[in-house]
Image (spheres, rainbow, N blue to C red):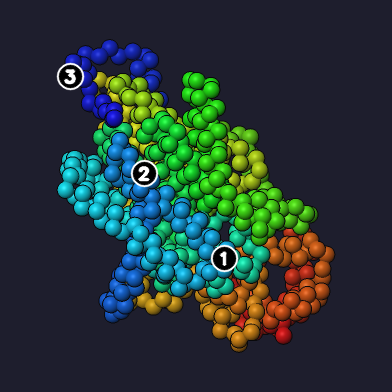
Amino acid sequence: MTFRSQTEPSPKASPAGEKITVRRVLGFIAASLWVIVPIAVFYIFHKPFSPGAWERISDALTHLSAAGAGERIRDALVDLSAAGWILWISVGIGRPFFRDREISTPERIAISGALGLGTLALLFLGTAWAGWMTRSAALVLCAGLTLLVSRPMLIGMVDFAKHAPRPPIEKGAFPLGLGFFLAGSLALSLGIALAPPAAWDALVYHFRIPQQILAGGSLSYAGDSLFREMPLSGEMLFTAAMGLTGRGETAAVLGWGTACLVLLGLTGTARRMGLRHTLLPAALLLSGDTLARSMGWGYVDWLSALFGFAALSVFSSREDPTRLVFAGILAGFAAGTKYTAGSLLGVLIFAVLSRKHPKESLRSLTILLAVFSLAFLPWIFRGMAFFGNPLPPILDAGPLAAQRMDFFTGRPLEGAWWMAAVTPLLQSTIGAYGAAPFAVTIGPLLLAFLPGALVARTGEPPAARLLLKLCWLSAIVFWAVCGVGGFFSELLVQPRLYLSLFPGIALLAAYGFEGLWRIRLRVVRLGAAAAVLGALVLAVQLAGFGQSWIASGVPGYLSGSQTRAEYLETNLGWHVRAAESARALPDGSRVLMLWEPRGFYCGQACSEDATIDRWYLLMRSGLTAEEIIAQWREEGWTHVLLFDTGAGFERASRSEYAEADWEELDRLQMELPVVERFGDGYTLYSLE
């Protein structure tokens, strides 16, 4: 069941003879401005290439050699094999539960993978909860599951090879360009995944928590990070990946493979929608610089995107209770990955309530909420068992917990009233990675192509109309949650938190691109201009990605001409030397970090300041510097690692601190003997 967008004029139409009216001219101008202005504004705020990029590229390429390529190839094969092993098991687990022949094979693979990954995450959660989560346990579990799923998987592959219809090959420069863009983005992001982990959140908790679980064999690991209290489906999968090889790179490659499932599924859904360019939704999703790079960072956002895509695809394939059950489970899996990814449930609720028969809507809503709760229930139980409340850290009680959450979430967004109305426009045009408040570059194309989605088309069957409704609801819910979230915290307007909604938004933008071809004045088509602009944006995005990829040293590391330490120093500066020095302290040493949330490279001897609130909370407790030192010694800490740069940044930007707090820090530094200084970035102090 497909519908075809009419991107070409009807043979009976005569564009040259069309009557030009004021309404048609104004409509054409308005649509043209909507396409052109976001792209133009985007490049005012985003320079395609950073200053000095070509010099860094030249230097990196000059020193490139293949001296240690053999070792890097071996490591890459290990990471790819282990991550592929987990994905194979995941698709095998989900395959028996979803064999809907009404949807395409790429969609079925992605949906099966989503169901399998969500199930595996809960299985590894139970294993860690029982205290059995070791590297040996990960190997045994994966081996056992492989025996269960491989035979039917292989039989299915043989059957598919015999009877699979030949997919249509898109011809023309634009489809070729889309393919080149996707292939380049996938290759570059895979290179990042195969290099040593260097992305902020991965070092803070996505990889740090699995490292701690494997070190202790259970969920009962040391630390006071708020991140460990949140749902951790992605981290449980990363725990298994790291358990197989002992390498963070394996977890990053697993994250990359998860993103590939999303992109694969989108191509199938695009074909089911009848879109002319089936690669376009995937390309639009990666047209944002941050989303393309993050495929290799080892973040869990792409896992939530996979659950979001799978729920949308399942629910749109056919309206019946079985599909609703699958969609509810996937929404529960999304919430188990990240609380904010649970906004996917809002899309499904609105879709159910929009049905014409109230009784049917109520019954469907009951089913949806029941299965969602069932899929999320293990995380509620874990919260009760380990933290004393069902939704930690959101429901933590007590003045200190309240102060900590207020400090963590930050202030409400300045100008939230007016920004709520235009947040998606600002996110698309001025939002940039590392820049407040959006912290993500999603690119202008997801916004620029939307006018075409309003163009009326005929001949759409009910399933296609439902899919389009879900896409619109994804965009509307995203707009709403970002707008409302800004009233509570500036963190809640970051698009990355809601990546579970982005597959629907990407499909809507691709559908809009098709519609732009129907907006024309005589022989001038807006779709042609959109195609040229879109191709330019994708080309510039890929070129910018490539130059930063080379400048960061990824090809140097992968070729073996750069050591692991050299690569990490290029990307993390003094952090690596400070962490290695702390880890090399005598056995029994315990290092407390201040203003440094990244504990991954410091190992188990360190306790990171994961939410950068350790000093703030100490100051709220009324202790003096001398009393704090005495307390730390009593608790068994032997050293303090102070991130001087981080403290300076907080001092300049955090109004929550009082000047007396910083004066007390100065007194503490004078009281403690210095063990070692690392440039102007870190200082290691002794408490002994």
Of marks 2 and 3, which one's residue comes earlier in the chain?
3
Mark 1 → mark 3, Cα distance in angstroms: 68 Å
Q: Residue at x 35, y 19 (%)?
A: 25
Q: Which comes sooner in the sequence, label 1 or label 3?
A: 3
Q: Which residue is mark 3?
A: 11
**346 vs 552, nearest the viewer:** 346
Disc 2 marks a residue whose amino acid type is: Phe
**Residue 77 falls in image quadrant:** bottom left
Question: Of helix, strand and loop, which one carries label 2?
Answer: loop
Which residue does the numbered mark 1 point to in the structure image?
A: 130
Q: Residue at x 18, y 42 (%)?
A: 165
Q: Which mark is residue 98?
A: 2
Mark 1 is on which residue type?
Ala
- In the image, residue 579 lies at what x, y percent? 55, 76
Snapshot quadrant of residue 546: bottom left
Q: Position of residue 420 (x, y in %)?
A: 58, 35
When the figure is inspected, residue 664 is found, relative to residue 431, above or below; the finding is: below
Q: Residue 570's x, y, as percent?
A: 44, 71
